[in-house]
Image (cartoon, rainbow, N blue to C red):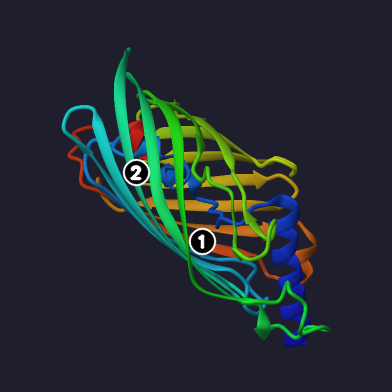
Amino acid sequence: MNKLRYIFLVFALLFVSEIQAQQDPQFSNYMYNPMDINPAYAGTKEGFVMTGLARLQWVGIEDAPRTQAFSMHSPVLKNMGLGFTAKNDVAGPLKQTMFYWDYSYQIDMGMDARLSFGLKAGFHIVNLDLTSIEAYDQNDPNIYNLNNRFIPNVGVGLYYYSYNFYMGVSAPRLLEQGMNPQLVGQALLVRHYFFTTGYVIDLDEVVKIKPSFMVKYTENAPPSFDFSANIYYTRVGFGVSYRYDDAIIGMFQLFVNQQLSIGYSYDYTLSGLRHESSGSHEFIFRYDFSKRTERCRPAKYF
């Protein structure tokens, strides 16, 4: 049964990579860590911010994806921001470690709004052991190992934000490259485009509602849509998200104090993987060193 699940996982990973071209790890709490997909977000808060995420995907399937990420960013000088992200992703025979640095420059747009321009640069270190998979033809040239394959990349982004609204467009990985340099057109790291937006609605002094939306697009693949709605009451937040044709997600967030927030989300899988998996779990914490005097400032929520 374990071998059957492993074969099923490998098939699912290949399907996601070749058909949907989503090699990068995905997060359900993307709205609380926008810098992962948009470098222009770096430095848009009032102070130094640290964020950590851990995702357990498709629980119940052996060797299913496991992802950990840590990011930090801060404003520098008057109109600039700097950021750093490190990620570790393991999915069956594929292991990726990613390091990226971000730079942003913001300009005032009036009415408490700013437009930020961002640049991202970094690299992947890829290890892939396809020989560990039992294959019919071990001499197949598509069966190979990669040891510490170094893959550099760059990205760009725009991010417009105000007191309670944000909107961003980005391409965090511009360079399309192959996993195996000796095989042309094999398992490309393809270019992804993102559009995100959200709005915090003040119902009263303590109750907020935040609808948000994200589109992911890759050439020769169907676009992916995420629709989310969160409601916040003083120190807690609850939400639901729908990832088109993939999952329904429940979210919870606790604001421990003015600086620290922790969250959890659960993905109920809608695809055929639901017969093998009990779903996906994701945990997030964020510590914001900004000093605030307003307890429920909407900017806390994005």
Q: Position of residue 138 (x, y in %)?
A: 76, 85
**Mark 2 sits on what residue?**
102
Graded by Cα atoms within 10 Å as few (under 14), some (14 to 19) or many (20 or more), the crowding at tag 1 reads many
The residue shown at (56%, 55%) is 24
| Left or right for 190, reference 121 | right
- Looking at the image, the residue that sits furthest to the front is 182
- In this view, the mark in front (1 or 2): 2
**Mark 1 sits on what residue?**
282
Describe the element under mark 1 as helix, strand or loop.
strand
Describe the element under mark 2 as helix, strand or loop.
strand
Q: Looking at the picture, does residue 278 appear above or below residue 100?
A: below
| Left or right for 57, reference 168 | right
- Looking at the image, the residue that sits furthest to the top is 110
Q: Looking at the picture, does residue 84 appear above or below residue 40?
A: below
The residue shown at (69%, 65%) is 13
- Contact between marks 1 and 2 (CB within 8 A): the answer is no
The residue shown at (42%, 34%) is 207
Q: Position of residue 268 (x, y in %)?
A: 67, 59
Residue 192 visible (yes or no): yes
Q: Position of residue 27 (x, y in %)?
A: 53, 53
Of residue 29 and residue 8, the one placed in the foreground of this image is 8
